[in-house]
Amino acid sequence: MPQTPHIERHFKSSAIVRDIVIGMSDGLTVPFALAAGLSGTIATSSIIVTAGLAEIAAGSIAMGLGGYLAAKSDAEHYKSERKREYREVAEIPEEEMEEVARVFRSYGLNQEEIAPVVEALSRRPKDWIDFMMRFELGLEEPEPARARVSAFTIAGAYVAGGLIPLAPYIASSSASKALMFSVAVTLAALLVFGFVKGRFSGARPLRSALQTALIGSLAAGAAFLIARAIS
Amino acid sequence: MPQTPHIERHFKSSAIVRDIVIGMSDGLTVPFALAAGLSGTIATSSIIVTAGLAEIAAGSIAMGLGGYLAAKSDAEHYKSERKREYREVAEIPEEEMEEVARVFRSYGLNQEEIAPVVEALSRRPKDWIDFMMRFELGLEEPEPARARVSAFTIAGAYVAGGLIPLAPYIASSSASKALMFSVAVTLAALLVFGFVKGRFSGARPLRSALQTALIGSLAAGAAFLIARAIS
């Protein structure tokens, strides 16, 4: 079997993993911190559940649609830059050849070493444009379905993450009792999530687990103190 | 004057603009949606202000620290990949030369055209490694102070954005009256922010303004309906 399909699959799955990480990081942290903060001033769970679910709805839509538009605008940016390169290669080929040469000169190559490559590229406009997109502008062609998949992945991960700290408040009507369970469940979830995230991203998993739990704790602690200070 | 300082400044300011956009997008949207959602079930502003400020604290810390760790792990990833390239160039130079050749072959160049460049790079290990980092791995060296600046920029933008929709609730004790002002002020802020964001990112400013306001409205509408449905 050729190697390309495997690489392709690897790349796609890592984009999805990245979106899950984006959604779940905030989904586990912000609703958790909000619920913990409100527990400092509100005794019954029902208002906290309402606030928490409203936050999950708002956060997942804002992040999902935000991801959708970001991916769409990446795709448009790529298309418009490509069109510009296409035009420039046709209209001002000498300047574009000079730009290719400049890329290589920045790595200490001299005119004699550069010339064959510049020559060869100038005879193949499609490869030339591909080269400029990647090496002059640093742009990669985005996948077409990226935006939609990205939006749903981020939003879904946010909802899934957000329901974990909220579950104890749904189960118990006493906010202070729910808070204890919520802290325990969410800290465990943050540790597991941080560990897995570290594994996938090539960071040290244990350090990633502790850092992720620390961010959640700091955010929740700050929300708790601010809510206390106000009321 | 040489051109480099200008490019440098342009690049730095665009990283800060990107961080402001990240923080303010969510800061304007999520606290706004949360407050609007709670206004559907809670008549007095004080609990909404508490929830809103707790959310702003939680969201700004989660996003700011998240940005900090992301920038730190980018920097570590770059360093460890660079170390690996350094080792490989020293230990298995033939394979690394073949990797350089492979980059060029993918743009349709033949062995004869590639050889001088590969030869020249192999005589300059530092440039060779720089070349591999950028063209094989697609990695750019992150700025050293990036992580800290990024964290404070994102968090500050989130707080600044979040206080806009909350201000009417702080000013008026009637949640329904505050809601109307909050919707008006926040929609205006989202339109202005979307317009400026479009200007900076090279998208059509008017379309960006409408899209940004639409995301905020959808998130707030969903939060409102969910809060209503629960209570």
Image: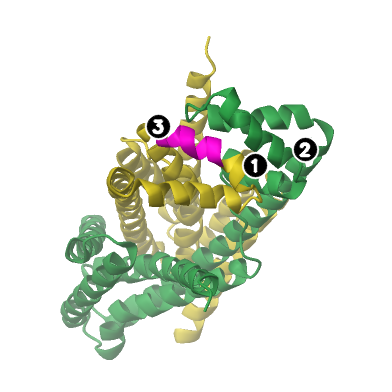
Chain colours: A yellow, B green
Determine contact: label 1, label 2, CB under 8 Å: yes
Estimate how packed mark 3 is, as few (under 14), some (14 to 19) or many (20 or more) residues with alpha carbons within 10 Å: few
A3 and A48: which is toward the camera: A3
Is residue A17 located in the magenta-colored stretch of the structure? no
What's the magenta region? A115-123
Choose between A188 and B24: the one closer to the eye.
Answer: B24
Image quarter of the C terminus of chain A? bottom left
Q: Which residue is mark 3?
A: A123
Q: Residues within 10 Å of mark 1 (few under 14, many from 20)?
A: many
Left/right placement of residue B194 relative to residue B119 reads left
Q: Amino acid at mark 1?
A: Met
- Regarding mark 1 in the picture, which secondary structure is present there? helix
Q: Position of residue A38 (x, y in %)?
A: 45, 71
**Sequence-earlier tag: 1 or 2:** 2
Question: Mark 1 highlights which residue?
Answer: B132
Q: Which residue is farthest top? A: A1
Q: Disc 3: which chain?
A: A
Q: Position of residue A40 (x, y in %)?
A: 50, 74
> Of residues A159 and B152, which is closer to you in this image?
B152
The three-letter code of the residue at mark 2 reads Val
Q: Residue at x 48, y 46 (%)?
A: A100
Residue B1, relative to residue B194: is it above or below?
A: below
- As helix, strand or loop, the secondary structure at mark 3 comes to loop
Could you classify mark 2 by the number of other residues whose Cα lies within 10 Å: few (under 14), some (14-19), or many (20 or more)?
many
Q: Are marks 3 and 1 on the same chain?
A: no
The main secondary structure of the magenta stretch is: helix
Quadrant hosting residue B175: bottom left
Numbered badge on residue B89: 2
Please identify the residue farthest to the front as the structure is shown.
A112
Q: Are marks 1 and 2 on the same chain?
A: yes
Relative to residue B12, is residue A230 depicted above or below?
below
